[in-house]
Amino acid sequence: MSCNKKILLSIVTTIVLSMIIAAFSLEYYVQSNKYDDVVLATINSKKMHEERTVIIHLPENYEQNKNKTYPVMYVLDGTSQDGHTFAKIDLLSKINEFPEAIVVGIPNTSGNRSRDFTPHYMKIDLEDEDSKKGNAHNFLAFIEKELVPYINSNYRTNGFQTISGHSRGGLFVLYAFIEKPELFNGYISYSPAFWREDIFIAEKTKAFLNENKVKDKFIFMSIGDGENEKMKNGYNVIHNLLNKELHSSLNSNNIALYSQTTTNANHGSNPYKSTIYALDKLNDYINNKY
């Protein structure tokens, strides 16, 4: 088969696959409770000084495959983002387009989403002059020191870890990358709120990249074509910064950087529509590296 035919076949396959999943993912998720082994666990967090509940989605045959280990995807905004993410991973794994995986949804505690996802050097509420700074450093410590060890101790994991987040959760994903680059293998950021405080996160990111040599990471970012200019501008600044700073080391250090503008997507729908593309690129990264 010629190179052009292979490329065309790959494009057609990707389009058809995304159409199938877009059409059936919601119905599949509704029906998947009989297959989806969901475990609710509560961790008494010393880092957060509160109890945190997590939603653990196990692969269909987890109990039968006693010797098999799995990658883990940690999903922020548990209860709204983890279900569709697991459904897509589960479906893709059945057609050998993604490895079976454990998905851990991290729900927000009442009223504290903004507190947990905002970096410790940024205001939680920009309209409040006396606003407190964010608590992302403690939330990240909870994930690193308490949640990840809990999952690794109680489930058969293989060491490959990814985190994904939407909006302010997408901002937290980049924050986690520059604060704890070795914690995760992959960082997925949907419609990230990089615009906050005049895109201050760009200054922090640039300083980190200038001072640190990062290697062997997967980074995916997406923005909906229907999102407002404030979101798009912040996204473009960070995208251009990462592309420039990482470009010279992309090949030597195996930094896989992908970005996407999702067609017919707004701020709310973008993570649901672009997850399939993130998983496709992550699958390629895993296959090429491992």
Image (cartoon, rainbow, N blue to C red):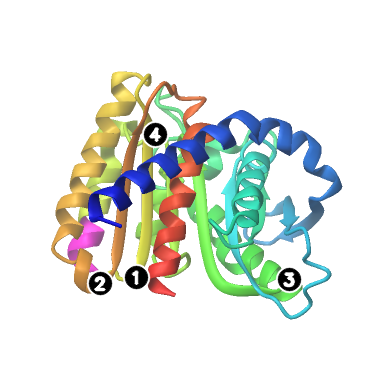
Circle 1 sits on which residue?
216
Work out whether mark 3 precedes mark 2 in sequence or the reverse, and give the earlier one: 3
Q: Label 3 vs label 2: CA separation?
A: 30 Å
Q: How many marks?
A: 4
Magenta stretch secondary structure, dominant: helix
Circle 3 sits on which residue?
155
Q: Image height check: is 48 above or below 66?
A: above
Graded by Cα atoms within 10 Å as few (under 14), some (14 to 19) or many (20 or more), the crowding at tag 4 reads many
Tell me the element at label 4.
loop
Q: Which residues are magenta?
A: 207-212
Could you tell me which residue is drawn at 60 percent across and 29 percent down? 23
Q: Amino acid at mark 4?
A: Ala
Circle 2 sits on which residue?
253
Q: Amino acid at mark 3?
A: Tyr
Provide residue 22's location: percent of width, then percent of height.
56, 31
Q: Is residue 66 left or right of residue 79?
A: right
Work out whether mark 4 precedes mark 1 in sequence or the reverse, and give the earlier one: 4
Could you tell me which residue is drawn at 25 percent across and 28 percent down? 233
Q: Is residue 267 left or right of residue 232?
A: right
